[in-house]
Image (cartoon, coloured by chain):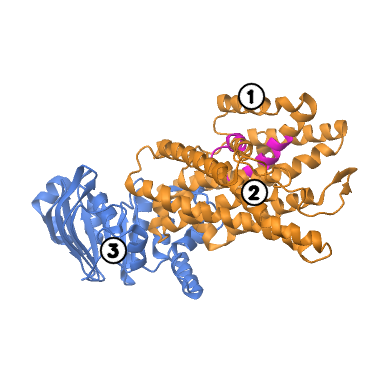
Amino acid sequence: MLLEIKSLDSGYGFLQVLWDVSFYVEEGEFVALIGPNGAGKSTTLKTISGLLEPQGGEILFEGNPIGGMEGHLVCRKGVAYISEELNLFVNMTVKENLEMGAFMIKDSAKQAENLEFVYELFPRLYEREAQFAGTLSGGERKMLAIGRGMMSGPSLLLVDEPSLGLAPMLTNEVFKALKALNARGTTILLVEQNVNKTLKNTSRAYILEKGKIVLDGKSADLADDEHVRKIYLGH
Amino acid sequence: MANAATESTIDKIDQTIEESFVQKAVRWLFSAGGITICLTILVAVVATIHKGPYILVNTFITGGMWALMAIGLALLFSVMNIAGFAHGEYFMAGSLTAYFVMQPISNYTLEHPESFMAYVGPMIAILAGTFMCAFLGILTERLVFKQLRMRNREGWLLNCFLITLGISVIFQNTHQLAFGANFKGILAYWDFPSVPIFGVYMSIDRICAFFIAILTMIGFYIFMMFSTSGKTIRAVSQDEDGARMVGISVDTVHVLTFALSCGLAGLAGASLLFMFPSYPTVGVMPLYNSWFIIILVGFGNVAGSIPGGFMIALFQVLTRSYLGEGWEAVVPVLLISLILIFKPSGIFATKVRTVWDE
């Protein structure tokens, strides 16, 4: 098991958001975490990636506990986190951003290989190589954030709301890229609001409501579920 | 249809981004930064013709050093959100260290005037001051700011402001207690006859101070732009969480930033020992100057500190020669007040980044 979360409690100071959340992600899977606004999806990812300290429970990555570990150490273990705000280095060029993504890879040949892979995945980034990240359009920023996450060659990719603020066409493109990454062996845990598209693309999904996991199963099964259809799909 | 629409908007954006070089230059000329820089150059030229080349020479020598101080301050502010009011004390510590290292060296060179030490000795003293301050900076970060960061980050900016004031008091009084309040100065680093530059006789020390400042700035630029450590510093200043997400240890970057920033202040203090003998409050004037620069160019603008340093220096040199010594402190404060009222983000209009934005 690549990632295992055991009865995780987390939140911001006195405000507890997650209550006894447990789930797992197997190697090579494409798993989605869906739920309404404020359910704690982003909090879950922030806690896994070490930007937020868990208040209770355990996070196991490849069998080792990573709960409460500092963000940069979690990243060095092979977990890449792509946040909702993207957290790009806006006054650096696209290429510099990508190079920073491979910061902890000391082998320059491996770095170049990853860079080539990202450019192959997003040719647009190659065209904009010398441009400052702050001048990119919304879709390009998403691509850059995903590309920067991929530069470290992670075994687990945590992606937070990649479709947020994107035109439907660009959303499709981002989903296509994520699927391609998954097909090449990267495990992905995706947080999304776009339930329809997410369930179509992922293999398994968890539904998080008010900080608790209320439903889980194969994405195809969930799409047929009464509760999901009523609340999330609207038919 | 949607596809075509998006493509055309992207093309439009491309056109606005890829304006010609001339257009960019013209736009820059009419921005606050461009106007100020052109005005400064004009004033410098007029004053030089009117009063003589010493105006320009003096501006370049002190301006470079103030710029080094301001770079350090800007780094602290942009990377760690610390408004450093103890920066003058690192200037003082740098000059003090250089003084004590220079003592035996100058005694030796008095006896052996032709020796190798007469050339290299001062460099050793200046480097000793620099590294001493870098070390003091690391100590300060570990003992004070790291502790504060681990405890809580609420009211960070104000807490840091008060803490740096406290550090400044501690440094000044330690100096007074341990070494006394008298002036600890040297006559000259390089004891050679002055050389004329554009009709102005310049001591070798002044010329060296100028070149030290320029070389340090070039070195600093190369370090920040091309080295991995420099890039991590820039990354943390632009997005701390983003830096964590790519595996940068923010803690290490903070130590590095403090070492660099305080080291630069120490370098300035050590190189200017021949002008400012070391005494407990020698750092106050350089601190004010670097704060003027920071306010002028905008908080946390590292690159802008360099032209800012020369502007403030020119301003002071002009005030001194046209209005007299006493006005030196008054006029810059007036200028800073005006900037704070009309252009609080500084002449280069960088976004003011503070903890209040977070």
Q: Which of marks 1 and 2 is in front?
A: 2
Q: Label 2: which residue?
A: B95
Q: What is the letter of the orange chain?
A: B
Q: Quadrant of residue A178?
A: bottom left
Q: Which residue is drawn at 51% across and 52% down?
A: B137
Per the image, label 1 sits on a secondary structure element best described as helix
Q: What residue type is labelled 2?
A: Ser
* Dominant SS type (magenta): helix
Residue B9: x percent and y percent? Answer: 49, 44
Which region of the structure is painted magenta?
A: B292-314
Q: Distance between the residues labelled 3 and 2?
A: 56 Å
**CA separation, marks 3 and 1?**
58 Å
Residue type of the residue flagged with mark 3: Ile
Is residue B313 one of those drawn in magenta? yes
Judge whether B115 appears above or below B186 on screen. Answer: below
Tell which subunit mark 3 falls on: A
Instruction: Identify residue for label 1.
Output: B334
Q: Can residue B203 be seen in this view?
A: yes
Q: Residue A188 carries which label?
A: 3
Residue B209 pos. (x, y %): 73, 50
Residue at the spot 62% in from the left edge and 53% down from the top edge? B97
Secondary element type, mark 3:
strand
Chain to which mark 2 belongs = B
Chain letter for blue, please. Answer: A
- Residue B89: give x, y in percent of width and height: 56, 43
Viewer-closest of A93 and B213: B213
Q: Which amino acid does label 1 sit on?
A: Leu
The answer to whether residue B1 of the structure is visible from this angle is no
Residue B323, percent from left and from top: 77, 24
Label 1: chain? B
Cα separation, mark 1 vs mark 2, equals 29 Å
- CB contact under 8 Å: marks 3 and 2: no
